[in-house]
Amino acid sequence: MSKQRLGRTALETAPLIFGGNVFGWTLDEAASFDMIDAWLDAGFNMIDTADVYSKWVEGHTGGESETVLGRYFKARGNRDQIILASKVGMEMPEAGRGLSRDWITREVEATLQRLNTDYLDLYFAHSDDQNTPLDETMDAFDRLVRDGKVRYLGASNYDGSRLVSALASARDLETARYQVLQPHYNLYERRDFEHDLADICHEHALGVTPYFALASGFLTGKYRSVDEIAGTAREPFLKDYFDERGMAILDALDEVSERHDTTPAAVSLAWLIAQPVVSAPIVSATSVSQLDQLIAATELRLDEADLNRLAEASTPQQAADSN
């Protein structure tokens, strides 16, 4: 199986994408500007955001990340240097949600205004909307492409059957189709993508840009027990990872990272990059040291022994038992 990059969809990018959910949240505006500058200086050129970032923060209503990015583009004048992705579909508080024609048409205008741009390189359906006919959704997205407001389309949080149906809808309507999938996929979360979506992405030449590439920080190896995260903001995200398989993955990451004199985070990302169908994982950093780990991942080449060790530790038990 040949490596699939975003170039398969006429997009060109470095092997990592910066996740913009931190802009206006864990990074204030000035720190966000500095991080984006450092990202570009490191040779990367793609940023992913969404209309709902960061509505989960007290006092936020969504749109904060896009607003920071829009101010950055205005200040730097370098919009054309960045491949920019955003998303629509999840609930904007007291405004709307879904993938209806009316909501997509309305929300893309709000996104473009916040981002201080007149086009998106990539626009994702952030979550499947089974209350709206797929034909309506694909036709609405196609209009954005034909109007020049969006260059390419992507899907996130679709299961295999709905993704196939959406691709079929676009084919039958002769509209623009999804060319990229953004799934939840990492060294721990393997089953859903590998057994329901990977073959579809290969068959239809979809680029794949996984989110939660480091499992909310678990795969960095920073946390080694539930006790360490008890009562913290990370507990809801990480508590289920500390099972037998999770600890086996950390052990394998330690072994491989020591062999290469690098970090578990770099190894985790290098494993994702090495997967044949993956185009570019989505990652975030809030410090220069974290950014250095991301850069290290793109320079790390795992050999067959490394990949086998990681695969052995991380293979989902159910899948292993069925083989």
Image (cartoon, helix red, strand yellow):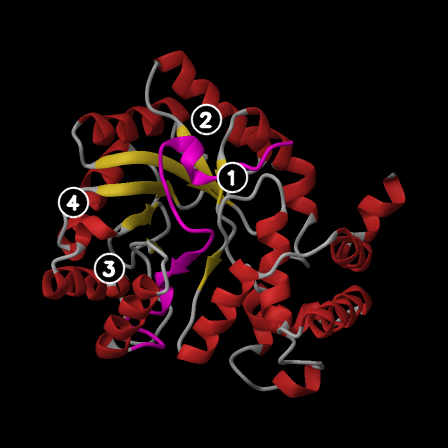
Q: Which mark is residue 109?
A: 4
Q: Residues within 10 Å of mark 4 (few under 14, many from 20)?
A: some
User: Which one is in front, 177 or 82?
Assistant: 82
Magenta residues? 1-27
Q: Toward which corner of the image does residue 21 lie, by quadrant?
A: bottom left
Q: Residues within 10 Å of mark 2 (few under 14, many from 20)?
A: many
Give how far apart the Cα atoms at labels 2 and 3 are: 27 Å
Look at 57% across and 64% down and name the residue there.
Answer: 214
Look at 16% across and 60% down and name the residue there.
Answer: 73
Image height of 228 relative to 206, above or below = below
Mark 1 or 2, nearer chain start: 1
Q: Which amino acid type is marked by label 4?
A: Glu
Q: Which amino acid type is marked by label 3?
A: Glu
Left or right of 238? Residue 135 is: left
Say which element carries label 3: helix
Mark 1 or 3, nearer chain start: 3
Residue receiving disc 1: 158
